[in-house]
Amino acid sequence: MAQIASEDFRKCRPLLRKWQKDLDNNQEDLILETFESMQGLKEDSFVHEVFEPVIRPFIRNINFKCEWSTDVLEASVHRKRKFDPILQGRKADFSVYLPIRGNKFYLLASEIKSADFILSNGNKIALEDWDIVKLGNEMKDIIDKCIYDGIKSNDLIICGLLVEGFQCRLFVMDLKYEAIYRMILLGKFYLPRDSSDFGVLPTSIERL
């Protein structure tokens, strides 16, 4: 799709429509719904109206489960309760996991700030630094919990998505070398700002 869009974006319409038809009935309007102006959306609305329609088609497997900002990361709870059994874990803004025999094997963790929050924040750089550190810690906790549950470290690759307004950065983390957690930037893409900004979708799809 990215190659077609680079030549003539109008040719993407049939592909997007086919993609839409392949989604289940509850998600049928995700990709082609008309985006109203998204600049003023608060974080919860931003996540569900801008972020979720783009990410949802990539997690269609019925075995995948999603958690939102109200859910505590089980991997984070596991680490913190080694030190104090009453401690609570971190809450990622969005995460995807695969439940197997009572355990949650996380594939993706995301930290998300709405465009309105980014624009109104007077100390943007410090905020972004904090979110990327938080995301890195969440990914590390996930790797450690997976190893505790029996997965070999050489086989582990965890994804992380940092959303700063309409800008997204996709990371992976591995533990191929002892005690070295490598957090690697795979790419950057953008979410649609309104109904005239669907031109960013091919790059978003390619990165994801």
Image (spheres, rainbow, N blue to C red):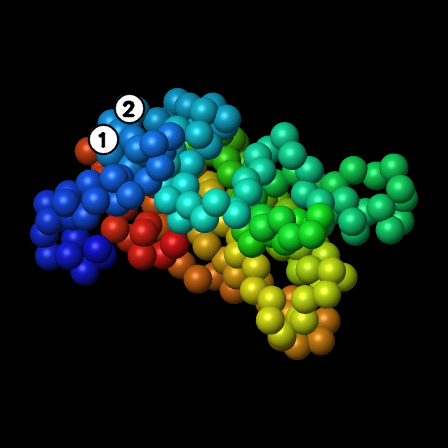
**Going 30% across and 33% down the picture, which residue do you hit?**
28
Which residue is identified by label 2? 36
Q: Do the residues labelled 1 and 2 touch (CB within 8 Å)?
A: yes
Marks 1 and 2 sit apart, C-alpha to C-alpha, by: 6 Å
Residue 64 in view (yes/no): yes
**Going 34% across and 32% down the picture, which residue do you hit?**
25
The amino acid sitting under disc 1 is Ser
Nearest to N terminus: mark 1 or mark 2 = 2
- The x and y percentages for residue 45 are 45, 24
- The x and y percentages for residue 158 are 57, 59
Q: Nearer the viewer, residue 150 or 200?
A: 150
The amino acid sitting under disc 2 is Glu
Does dot 2 land on a helix, a strand or a loop? loop
Which residue is identified by label 1? 195
Check the picture and name the quadrant holding the C terminus. Answer: bottom left
Q: In which quarter of the image is residue 180?
A: bottom right
